[in-house]
Image: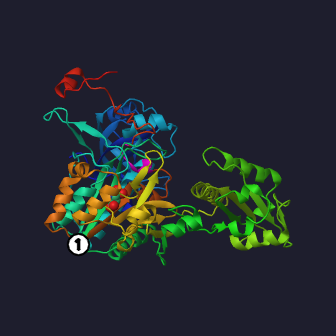
Amino acid sequence: MYRSHSCGELRATDINKEITLSGWVQKTRDKGFMIWVDLRDRYGITQLIFDEQRTPKEVVEKAKNLGREFVIQVTGTVIERESKNKNIPTGEIEILVSEFNILNEALVPPFTIEDETDGGEDIRMKYRYLDIRRNPVKNSLMFRHQVAMKVRNYLSKEDFVEVETPYLIKSTPEGARDFVVPSRMNEGQFYALPQSPQTFKQLLMVGGMDKYFQIVKCFRDEDLRADRQPEFTQIDCEMAFVEQEDILTIFEGLTRHLLKEIKNVEIADFPRMTYAEAMKTYGNDKPDIRFGMKFGELNSVAQHKDFKVFNDAELVVGIAVPGGASYTRKEIDKLIDWVRRPQVGALGMVYVKCNEDGTFKSSVDKFYDQEDLANWAKTTGANAGDLICVLSGQINKVRAQLSALRMELAERLGLRNPEEFAPLWVVDFPLLEWDEDTERYHAMHHPFTSPKPEDIALLDSKPGDVRANAYDLVLNGNEIGGGSIRIHDKETQALMFDHLGFTPEEAKAQFGFLMDAFQYGAPPHGGIAFGFDRLVAILGGQETIRDYIAFPKNNSGRDVMIDAPANIDQEQLKELNIKLDL
Ligand code: ASP
């Protein structure tokens, strides 16, 4: 028996017990006649004492050679500790060791295995198994497990069944690139790793499985952005015989449940907003609604004077920054530099100070009088003491720019309180999205999303105006889930592929299996998927999803621990009949 107890278990009530513990040597303190060792395992730390008076001499001698991270097994008696440590649950006792074994020695670790480590990100990634011994990482993984359990329990209670779907599938166009896997037995052919189990979960609905869920790995070969992983986890769900409302209700329930159980937060209000409204009011389809600074569109009150920049703009739009009238010239210049950074891309910024005495001072006083500026203040909701920031230009661009500024200012003003949770459904997404590069429409969500029946007539004349039964769940400015009601008949699906530029042959080759299935009694269905890594990170209060993934990839998509991706040997390539021309 390696242990009778864990290192986090023993208390004053266990005093005098004979016990056995196993774990890692966190730290030793050698006073010559007495040695203390902190022994650590997943459950905590217990102090060991080797005392020349009370411990056999050879045991004390052996203990002198213990190094950090040695794995040992000790047997001894639980005794009361003289100087108690109130900070840890085992702090009232220590183990008077009578014998011990070294189960394994350890090299000196390349960084300290403590809450505050001296190891940088790279070295910790390379030795992730050592990093996992540290409380912050260990606790994050345990937290992730807790969230997964709560999700599983909630959905099981709601009658959902977890079904596994395959990882070796066929390439499907879902927006990103597929990772592909060569097939040895089918020369020249490739599997693709799923970007999501989308078509399979729909086929499960045709199969009558009704409420399906799966906590599942998905793979997308996208250009890596900060905090994106090429493989990530979704809570993937699908239901049959449902309308949008049914889905929103169930997953609002799941979100409330998680926030209550994990954060002890009761969500009073679960607002909804259309995509069009979100874009108009926040310039963004995933607005953080914990704070105001709503957009005020100023075209009607700013385009009647000689200010050419505004007159030429498709949209003139502003936000009121609370307390911003006190910003110095220098501070405002810095803000202007900020919006002009290439990442934001504005050409400039007009500002208006709303003075405490009710007057206005703007950077365009030459063109606008006090009455004009009072109108701007009214439209942006600015009060005395605020600063109005105004951007102008092409509608989509200027909205994105002002949205970036709004988020930045909210961050600086401390308005993004991590302890406050404000979920929001964004509904009625456009079905199609124009892609400048390929000069054609793409499915905004995916090609299986159903158009709103009342908008189908617009598919030919104004494809960009067709709305979908598609929805996103947003939490504090993060998209945490998204889904849609699906097409479930062959004709509509064929029509959709046609509008996406597929020939009937291409559609059949790629999605024949789905369209065939739709001919065998497909029920109306719809679903949603949550980004599990992000959800866990938000609930856990950490910035990055990496903290919650046991073995994450770095920003270049590499696993630096196992050194992947890597070359494969000639034999393997030959077997796969792949010739590299590098
Ligand atoms: N498969 C979709 C996605 O990964 C989610 C859904 O429509 O259910 O975004």
Q: Nearer the viewer, residue 48 or 441?
A: 441
Can residue 430 be seen here? The reply is no
- Within the image, what quadrant is residue 322 found in? bottom right
Quadrant containing ligand 1 reads bottom left
Q: Residue at x 23, y 72 (%)?
A: 159
Up the image or down, 350 lies above or below 154; here it is above
Q: How is the image coloured?
A: rainbow
Assign a secondary structure to mark 1: loop
Q: Nearer the viewer, residue 398 or 8?
A: 398
Up the image or down, 231 lies above or below 307; here it is above
* 340 with respect to 134 (left or right): right
- Within the image, what quadrant is residue 155 found in? bottom left
Can residue 402 be seen here? The reply is yes
* 143 with respect to 241 (left or right): right
Q: Residue at x 22, y 25 (%)?
A: 573
Amino acid at the residue labelled 1: Asp
Q: Would residue 548 be counted in the magenta stretch?
A: yes
The picture places residue 270, in percent across and down from the top left corner, at 46, 75
Q: Residue at x 35, y 57 (%)?
A: 499
Residue labelled with disc 1 = 159
Up the image or down, 485 lies above or below 343; here it is below
Q: Would residue 144 be counted in the magenta stretch?
A: no
The picture places residue 351, in percent across and down from the top left corner, at 76, 59
Quarter the C terminus occupies = top left
* 356 with respect to 154 (left or right): right
The picture places residue 557, in percent across and down from the top left corner, at 40, 38
Q: Nearer the viewer, residue 355 or 254?
A: 355
How many numbered marks does the figure carry? 1
Magenta residues, start to end? 545-551
Query: Which residue reaches farthest bottom?
Result: 268
**Ligand 1 closer than 8 Å to label 1 CB:** no
